[in-house]
Image: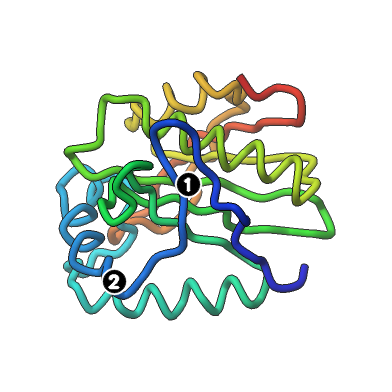
Amino acid sequence: MSTLSFPRPPLADEVVALRPWRRADIPQKFAGFSDPLCQRFSWPSAERFTEAHVRRNLEDEERERLNGEALNFAVVDVAAREHVLGGAQLYDVDGARSCAAVGYWLAPHARGRGIATRTVRLLARWGFERLALARLELTCGPDNTASQRVAERCGFTREGMLRSHLPFQGVRRDTVMYGLLPGELD
């Protein structure tokens, strides 16, 4: 796939908007992602998370976008687009297979309000309509019940458990696999 472009206008509903990350977001992204829950479920490295990781990550994300592999978004309050609620991405974009994966994380102040569900729905709808995806995947740890509930609320089907699927914080972790096809989005 060629370079991925951010949607214009930005993806949004009446509560959240998804926009490109900005350098000015680094402190908010670091603070939100430093939360123990984000670290437990979304930080794969055994290395301590630092602000330098956030800076380096912005460069990596731009390279992935230019290579057509991923598109990373700041999840923001629709009324105050400088107020970061979390992050989301469409990644492992495979144009030949017409599939991609969706991921997200939320800062503690944004949880429990349906923001992750809204975010996944926006990304899924855009991926199916604009990128002509035939399949969208969502994976999470077996103990991440909140992410499993988000997947199910969006219409994803639990397809199984991938045992010892990936290196995660110095060990191998199992992964729950969910899939969503066009027309299944709730």
Instruction: Reply above or below: 122 against 21.
Output: above
Residue 125: percent from left, percent from top: 66, 36
Residue projecting furthest to the right: 96
| Left or right: 164 as drawn, with respect to 30 | right
SS at mark 2?
Answer: helix
- Which residue is at 18% across, 67% downward? 27
Instruction: Reply above or below: 118 against 69.
Output: above
| Left or right: 173 as drawn, with respect to 12 | left
Looking at the picture, which amino acid does disc 2 mark?
Val
Residue 63: percent from left, percent from top: 55, 79
- Which residue is at 65% across, 24% downward? 185
- Which residue is at 82% across, 53% downward? 97
Task: Please tell me how many numbered marks the rendered image carries.
Answer: 2
Residue 49: percent from left, percent from top: 20, 67
Residue 83: percent from left, percent from top: 25, 51
Name which of mark 2 and mark 1 comes first in the sequence.
Answer: 2
* Mark 2 neighbour class, 10 Å CA radius: few under 14, some 14 to 19, many 20 or more: some
* Mark 1 neighbour class, 10 Å CA radius: few under 14, some 14 to 19, many 20 or more: many
Residue in the foreground of this view, choosing between 78 and 72: 78
What whole-number distance in Å separates the C-alpha atoms at marks 2 and 1? 17 Å
| Left or right: 42 as drawn, with respect to 39 | right
SS at mark 1?
Answer: strand
Marks 2,1: beta carbons within 8 A: no
The quarter of the picture where the C terminus appears is: top right
Reading the image, the residue beneath label 2 is 54
Reading the image, the residue beneath label 1 is 103
- Which residue is at 79% across, 40% downward? 134
Looking at the picture, which amino acid does disc 1 mark?
Gly
Tell me, for residue 113, which label it has, or none. Answer: none
